Amino acid sequence: MKSFALIAKALVKIMRRNTNVFLFLYFSIIIYNLSMDKMTIESKENIIKKVQIIAEKVENLVSKTTGYNLPITYLTIFSHTQQEYKNLLDLCSKLGIKSEANNGFKFLLKEPIQTIGGFIKNIRIREPDPYRSQIGCADVQVQDYTKFKLQEITKHPENLRIIKRPDYEMIEYFDLNTNDVLAYVMSNQ
């Protein structure tokens, strides 16, 4: 975090002296971040990297919002085009056992993917959805859903909301400032 503050201060100094250099650096950083988040996934290694990026961003979202480090039980990669969706399904078929899931297919991985917070054993590839511009989402687990809901939902209305479904409900973590991942706590875990 200290290095980020130093970089930010340096960018402000550059901006004051030379706007063109600042704009170049600013857009270079944005392009780099987009390339990491929206990277073309063409290999097993790219899928592993994408899962790790999504997991890290979910863990950061959860920690930043509520201060918890919650284990990820299920991770979803969002596709944004039909070609990307097909490509992801083809590659993931080599990584695990495919079965139907809501809005796509899920895979029970032959070899779990290690992330900072643990191992991911299940991934889902979501069909393209114009309302899902994020790179992915994950389900996180709490010990007591009801207690978590009562304690946290009113503390963080800008980053948590309840979504009701016919058979269950869930709490969605979101951040409108970054809007790159979502996280869910399920009532029926």
Image (cartoon, rainbow, N blue to C red):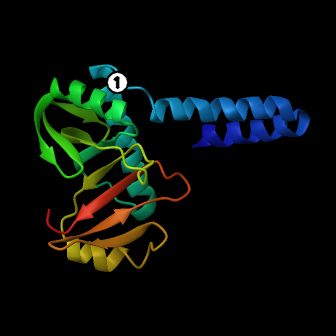
Q: Quadrant of the N terminus?
A: top right
Nearer the observer, 135 or 157: 135
Residue at image location 22% in from the left, 71% down from the top: 165
Residue extending furthest toward the right? 17
Residue 28: percent from the left, percent from the top?
66, 29
Left or right: residue 160 compared with residue 119: right
The residue where tag 1 is placed is 46
Left or right: residue 16 compared with residue 82: right
Residue at image location 24% in from the left, 24% down from the top: 91
Q: Is residue 159 above or below residue 120?
A: below
Residue 106: percent from the left, percent from the top?
17, 42
Residue 74: percent from the left, percent from the top?
21, 48
Nearer the observer, 64 or 80: 80
- Residue type at the position of mark 1: Asn
Residue 188: percent from the left, percent from the top?
14, 66
Q: Quadrant of residue 153?
A: bottom left
Q: Is residue 20 above or below residue 127?
A: above
Q: Quadrant of the C terminus?
A: bottom left
Left or right: residue 181 compared with residue 86: right
